[in-house]
Image (cartoon, rainbow, N blue to C red):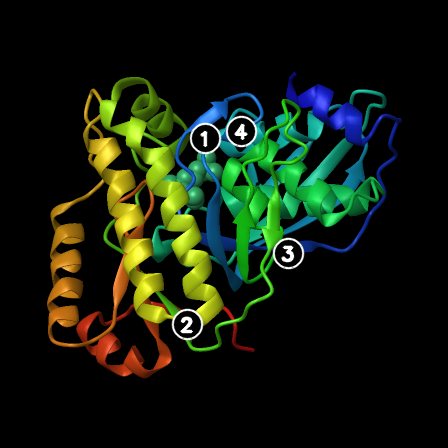
Amino acid sequence: MNKLDVINLLVPHPVQPRAVEEQFAPSNIALCKYWGKRDRELNLPVNASLSVSLKSLGSRTRLSPIDGLADEVWLNGERQRPETMFASRVSAFIDLFRQHSSFSLKVETHNNIPTAAGLASSASGFAALALALNECLDLQLNPQQLSVVARLGSGSACRSVFDGFVEWRMGQREDGMDSHGIPLDQQWPDLCIGLIKVDASTKAVDSRAGMQRTLETAHLYQSWPLQAATDLSRLQQAIETQDFALLGECAEQNALSMHATMIASWPPLLYWQPDSITAMRQVWQLRQEGLPVYFTMDAGPNLKLLFEASAREVLLEQFPGMEIVQPFCA
Ligand code: PMV
């Protein structure tokens, strides 16, 4: 089964583009990480994951039909050459919908994720593109189907189709139709996420390559699916009971366990930089002094702090310039 087969199941007829309003999708931070694929073509995960969406931080995408043979791809107001990674991934994604009709699109994407925070934008980018294609091509897909489509662009994008807490059920089916995001009902108005920039430059090994290397070479990876399943159910319990210490502990331990599998792969993958470790120690020290603050990290050197609104001022003193998002507050 490949991506074209999946799109054919969802959209078996020719489509006609029309100019529509831009669509927004938020970035998301995983509290229980997606790490490892059981199907690399369809981005089907080895484990279920759980994230929180970053409300108004994310990607806006506008699509409009144009004459000509090639798409025109713009990012943050700058035209991207077709051979760039960004433009080629966007056009390859649109190709999935050009199986029965030919058309070209102008794609205008704006990311408002602070570039300084070093956050990945592929999750919100592919989610916004999936939402925009749904409107532009009048696909009439429901949110779960849109989550499936976004996953074909980038795994974690399937969670960015929704706001708030989102679980990505791993699913069992070969076509992946049961592997998509599900929004959770619970809110957590006090929950804050602090974005700490250690280094915002492009990393040498992206998450796609990193998770494959880990899966193929780290013996430690064998214990990851069980760890992730345990963390996921504890996180669900923490969210259900609004137990912040449990939420923070699970998220931090889950992130460190994922990094342990990276470090144990060959050649080793260490995304941390000296400043990442300094920030981790600072968090541990603050916790020892009684401040409930935890961190999570993705395939990069930057930390995302987890805390409640009451710790905001102290943490801003400790980490000046930290960008804070309160995902459940207006
Ligand atoms: O969706 P990808 O291929 O960029 O992978 C994301 C992987 C992590 O960010 C490390 C974890 C996650 O669940 O977001």
Q: Give the mark nearer the N terminus: 4 vs 2.
A: 4
Please tell me whether residue 54 is drawn above or below residue 207 in the rendered image: below
**Residue 137 position in % (x across, y down):** 82, 39
**Where in the figure is residue 58, as x and y percent of width and height?**
53, 56
- Does the numbered disc 4 mark a residue whose Cβ is under 8 Å from ligand 1? yes
Specify which label sits upstream in the sequence, 1 or 3: 3
Instruction: Give the structural element (helix, strand or loop) at label 3.
Output: strand
Within-10-Å neighbours for mark 3: few <14, some 14–19, many 20+ = many
Q: Nearer the viewer, mark 2 or mark 1?
A: 1
User: Which residue corresponds to mark 1?
Assistant: 46
- Mark 1 and mark 3: span between their CA atoms? 28 Å
Which of the pair 75/98 is nearer the observer? Answer: 98
Q: Position of residue 297 (x, y in %)?
A: 30, 50
Q: Earlier in the sequence, mark 2 or mark 3?
A: 3
Q: Are there few (<14), some (14-19), or many (20+) residues within 10 Å of tag 1?
A: some
Residue marked by disc 4:
43
Q: Which mark is residue 205?
A: none
Q: Amino acid at mark 2?
A: Leu
Q: Position of residue 109 (x, y in %)?
A: 60, 48
Residue ID for mark 3: 24
Q: Quadrant of ligand 1?
A: top left
- Which residue: 65% across, 43% down? 147
Tell me which amino acid carries mark 4. Asn
Q: Is mark 2 within 8 Å of ligand 1?
A: no
- Tell which of 23 and 291 is nearer to you: 291
Q: Quote the CA–CA distance across marks 4 and 2.
A: 30 Å
List the residue tagged with mark 2: 191
Label 2: state its secondary structure. strand
